[in-house]
Image (cartoon, rainbow, N blue to C red):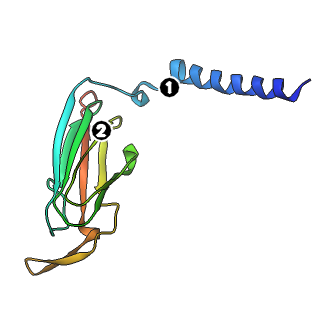
């Protein structure tokens, strides 16, 4: 038998298995939910503060989230939300937009993904590692945070 026919048959079996799993075997709580709601949130990296404002964002599972990110600093920052595959550079003195669908409920950290230095703010040393926050995705159907 031709090796290309065997490879094609294996690919068809693998793809077919995935389709059957997603269609019939995937537990209901694992299926992606899209509510159709759009949450537009503006987040700022204030000049020489090494923080995000706001530090806590709350949305519902299935919401489309549109983050408008404003970098007020003279140097680059970044935003990363690992759970949703977000990793975006925020150029100095620029505004960018990031969009994603909150497909899973829970609390997820977001953080600056670009080393951006350190400074003294109100007598306290702040740095790149202080640029963290929390994305809270509520599951309305299951009443979990």
Image quadrant where residue 10 sits: top right
The image quadrant where one finds the C terminus is top left
Count the numbered circles shown. Answer: 2
Is disc 2 placed on a helix, strand or loop?
strand
Viewer-side residue, 145 vs 35: 35
Name the side, left or right, on which 131 lies relative to 28.
left
x and y, in percent, of residue 144 in the image:
26, 37
- The residue depicted at 17 percent of the width and 42 percent of the height is 41
x and y, in percent, of residue 21 in the image:
56, 24
x and y, in percent, of residue 39 in the image:
19, 34
Q: Which residue is mark 2?
A: 99
Circle 2 packing at 10 Å, graded few (<14), some (14-19), many (20+), is some
Image quadrant where residue 55 sits: bottom left
Circle 1 packing at 10 Å, graded few (<14), some (14-19), many (20+), is few
Name the side, left or right, on which 125 lies relative to 105.
left
Give whichever of discs 2 and 1 has the lower sequence position.
1
The image quadrant where one finds the N terminus is top right
Image quadrant where residue 112 sits: bottom left
Q: Nearer the viewer, mark 2 or mark 1?
A: 2
Real-space Cα separation, disc 2 to disc 1, in angstroms: 26 Å
Q: Which residue is mark 1?
A: 26
Label 2 with label 1: CB-CB less than 8 Å:
no
- The residue depicted at 64 percent of the width and 25 percent of the height is 15
Above or below 106: residue 111:
below
- The residue depicted at 39 percent of the width and 50 percent of the height is 82
Answer yes or no: is residue 94 visible.
Answer: yes
Answer yes or no: is residue 145 visible.
Answer: no
Is disc 1 placed on a helix, strand or loop?
loop
Which residue is situated farthest in the left direction here?
122
Above or below 84: residue 24:
above
x and y, in percent, of residue 33 in the image:
34, 26
Q: Which mark is residue 6?
A: none
């Amino acid at each position: 038998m031709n090796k290309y026919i065997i490879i094609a048959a294996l690919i068809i079996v693998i793809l077919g298995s995935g389709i059957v799993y997603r269609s019939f075997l995937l537990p209901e709580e694992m299926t992606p939910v899209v509510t159709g709601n759009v949450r537009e949130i503006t987040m700022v990296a204030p000049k020489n503060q090494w923080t995000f404002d706001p530090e806590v964002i709350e949305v519902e599972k299935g919401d489309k989230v549109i983050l408008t990110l404003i970098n007020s600093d003279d140097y680059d920052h970044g935003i990363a939300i690992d759970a949703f595959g977000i990793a975006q550079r925020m150029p100095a003195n620029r505004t960018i937009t990031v969009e994603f669908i909150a497909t899973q409920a829970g609390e997820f950290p977001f953080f600056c993904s670009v080393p951006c230095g350190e400074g003294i703010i109100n007598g306290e040393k702040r740095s790149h590692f202080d640029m963290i926050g929390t994305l809270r995705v509520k599951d309305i159907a299951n009443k979990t945070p």
